[in-house]
Image (spheres, grey):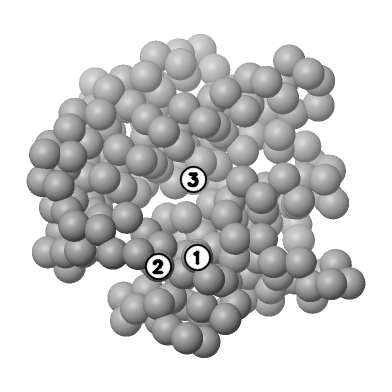
Amino acid sequence: MIILYDCATAPSPRRARILLAEKGISHATVQVDLARGEQMGDAYRAINPQCTVPALRTDEEDGLLLTDNAAIAAWVEARYPQPPLMGVTPREKAEIASWNWRIEFEGLLAIAETLRNSSPAMADRALPGPVNYAQIPELAQRGLARIQHFFETLNERLAGRDFIATDRLSIADITAVVAVDFARVVRVKPGEQHPELLRWRAAMAQRPSMAMAR
C-alpha cells in the first residue's frame, strides 16, 4: 500500500493529495502534526530526515520513500500515466514544466517567505527542514509584492484559456490552485481585478479531486 505522510492544514502535502486524487490512486494516510512540531521529532526524522511533508512511501519492493513534490509527481506520473498530468508531447512536457516551476518560484515561494518571515509562530523557522533560520522581515514585505505580481501573471495567462499550461489539466494547475488558496494565510486573495483567475479557480472547485483533497 502506498502511504502519504500528510498534514491536512499545510499547502505542500495538499498538492500531493490532489495529484493522487486526480490519478485515482488508493493510498493510506499518516497525519503529521506540524503545529505541534511532530515533523521535528525522532519518530518522523527516522522516516524523513528532511523533517518535511509530504513524503510518499511507494509500493516498490524496497519501500522507496519520496520526500518532495517533484519526486512524488515524477514517480506517480511514470507509474500511473493516465490521465497524463505532466504532458505527452515534448512541447507539452516543456510548457508544463516551465509553468509549474514559475508557479513554485513566483507564487509558492513568495507566499512562504511572506509567512515564514512575519509570523511570530515561525520565529527562527524561516525555512522548512531540520535547521533553524532567523526571520528576515524585509523578505516578508518583498513577498507581498511578489504575490500581487504572481496573481497578475496568472490572470493574464488564463485569458481565453481553461488551464494554465496546455489545453487540459496539468500539474501546473494543481500547483497553482494550492498557491492561490495558500495566499489567504497572508491575507491576500484574487479580486475583481483578476477576473480570469477567479473564473479558473471557480472551475477548479468543481473538480471531484478538490473536494477529496481539501
**Mark 1 is on which residue type?**
Gln
What residue is drawn where x is 75% and y is 51%? 76
Q: Is residue 57 above or below residue 181?
A: below
In front: 209, or 72? 72
Q: Which residue is mark 1?
A: 50
Question: Quick check: can you spot residue 68?
Answer: yes
Reading the image, the residue beneath label 2 is: 130
Q: Residues within 10 Å of mark 1 (few under 14, many from 20)?
A: some
Where 174 sits versus 142, above or below?
Answer: below
> Quick check: 61 above or below 183?
below
Q: Secondary structure at mark 3?
A: loop
* Mark-to-mark CA distance, 3 and 2: 34 Å
Q: Quadrant of residue 27?
A: bottom right
Looking at the image, is 171 positioned above or below residue 4?
Answer: above
Q: Residue at x 89, y 72 (%)?
A: 61
Q: Give the position of the N terminus as an image quadrant.
A: bottom right
- Looking at this rendering, what residue extends furthest in the right direction? 61
Q: Secondary structure at mark 1?
A: loop
First in residue order: circle 3 vs circle 2: 2
Q: Quadrant of residue 64?
A: bottom right
Residue 205, numbered circle:
3
User: In the shown orientation, is residue 47 left or right of residue 38?
Assistant: right
Write the residue at 30% across / 38% down. Answer: 110
